[in-house]
Image: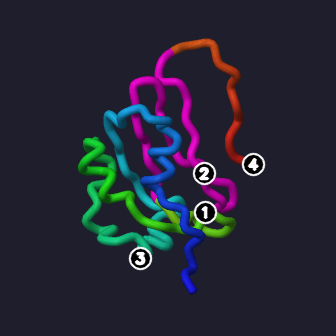
Amino acid sequence: MSKFKNDNLKNWVLTEAEGEAVEGIVIGEMGWGDYLSEDIPNYEDIPKGKLLTWDEGSKLIDYDFDSGYGAPGCQAIYVWTESKVMFISQYDGATCIHSIPRNPCDVKPEMPGG
């Protein structure tokens, strides 16, 4: 039985992008340092903090993980499309993806997290 809930970081980005092309992605560390990094394929080879194209970066975040409570099972990311910036948030390890407008606009702000 897999420990993952079939959440997939690449799929989260594509869903949140709502059809917009991804212009760039920066991949960071795991949510709690390197804890659970052994679950990420080729984790040590991922260039952390470097701006990547979607073609380069999407291959590195195409993995399943458990988004439930406990240690975060995915890496921190920043992702840019034409109209938004996406990022991962977590509360006690429960993770989800959020986005904010890339440019000033009328919008009702939210407060992700706990």
Q: Are marks 4 and 2 in contact (CB under 8 Å)?
A: no
Amino acid of disc 3 = Glu
Q: Which residue is mark 1?
A: 67
Magenta region's main secondary structure?
strand
Q: CA distance from mark 4 to mark 2?
A: 12 Å
Residue depicted at x 44% and y 75%: 39
Q: Amino acid type of disc 4?
A: Gly
Q: Which residues are magenta?
A: 75-103
Seen as rendered, the residue at the extreme right is 114
Give how far apart the Cα atoms at labels 3 and 4 are.
Answer: 27 Å
Disc number lying in front (1 or 3): 1
Q: Which residue is mark 3?
A: 38
- Secondary structure beneath dot 4 equals loop
Please tell me how crowded label 1 is: few (under 14), some (14-19), or many (20+) other residues with Cα within 10 Å: many
Secondary element under disc 3, as helix, strand or loop, is helix
For discs 1 and 4, the disc positioned in front in the rendered view: 1
Q: Are marks 2 and 1 in contact (CB under 8 Å)?
A: yes
Of labels 4 and 2, the one closer to you = 2
Marks 1 and 4, the one that precedes in the sequence: 1
Expressed as whole percent of the image width and height from the top left, the position of residue 45 reads 25, 65
- Residue 96 is tagged as 2
Query: Marks 1/4: CA distance?
Result: 15 Å
The first of marks 3 and 2 along the sequence is 3
Specify whether residue 87 is painted magenta: yes
Looking at the image, residue 43 sits to the left or right of residue 4; the answer is: left
Q: Quadrant of the N terminus?
A: bottom right
Task: Quickly name the residue at label 4.
Answer: 114
Q: Position of residue 68 (x, y in %)?
A: 66, 65
Q: Residue at x 36, y 34 (%)?
A: 21
* Residue lying at 47% horizontally and 33% vertically, measured from the top left: 85
State the residue at coordinates (30%, 44%).
54
Q: CA distance from mark 2 to mark 1?
A: 7 Å
